[in-house]
Amino acid sequence: LRSIAEKPEFAEYGPANTAIFYESLDFAATVPSPTNFNVIEPILNRHYATIWNGEKSVEEALQAAHDELQPEMDKLQQG
């Protein structure tokens, strides 16, 4: 991967700012998904769709998502 990313062709024809993302690999770490991701992902997607469809403002949709997600996240804390 490093040998390809360092080729001049990659720099010339690759996506803009590729070097920034490539350089971050030296110190980046994965973030584990919450164990209830299968529950929260559809909730987030449903609320994101209301933003994309112009049904709600970003603030309204994110507040609604938060209100629905909080009980699910609280369940994780309870074990």
Image (tube, helix red, strand yellow):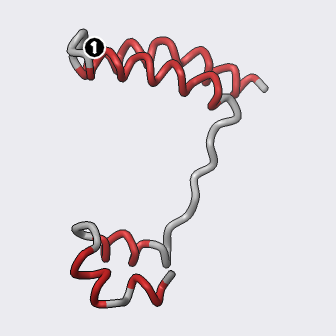
- Residue at the right extreme, as displayed: 79
From this view, report whether residue 28 is shown above or below residue 67: below
> Count of labels shown?
1
**23 displayed left or right of 51:** right
Local secondary structure at mark 1: helix
The residue drawn where x is 36% and y is 69% is 21
* Residue 5 on image: x %, y %: 40, 82
Quadrant of the drawing holding the C terminus: top right
The residue drawn where x is 28% and y is 72% is 14
The residue drawn where x is 37% and y is 89% is 6
Q: Residues within 10 Å of mark 1 (few under 14, many from 20)?
A: some
Check disc 1 and report the residue beneath it.
Answer: 60
**43 displayed left or right of 36:** left
* Residue 75 on image: x %, y %: 69, 20
* Residue 15 on image: x %, y %: 27, 67
* Residue 23 on image: x %, y %: 39, 78
The residue drawn where x is 50% and y is 12% is 68
From this view, report whether residue 69 is shown above or below residue 30: above
Q: Nearer the viewer, residue 38 or 10?
A: 10
Q: Nearer the viewer, residue 25 or 3?
A: 3
**6 displayed left or right of 67:** left
The three-letter code of the residue at mark 1 reads Glu
Which image quadrant is residue 70 in?
Answer: top right
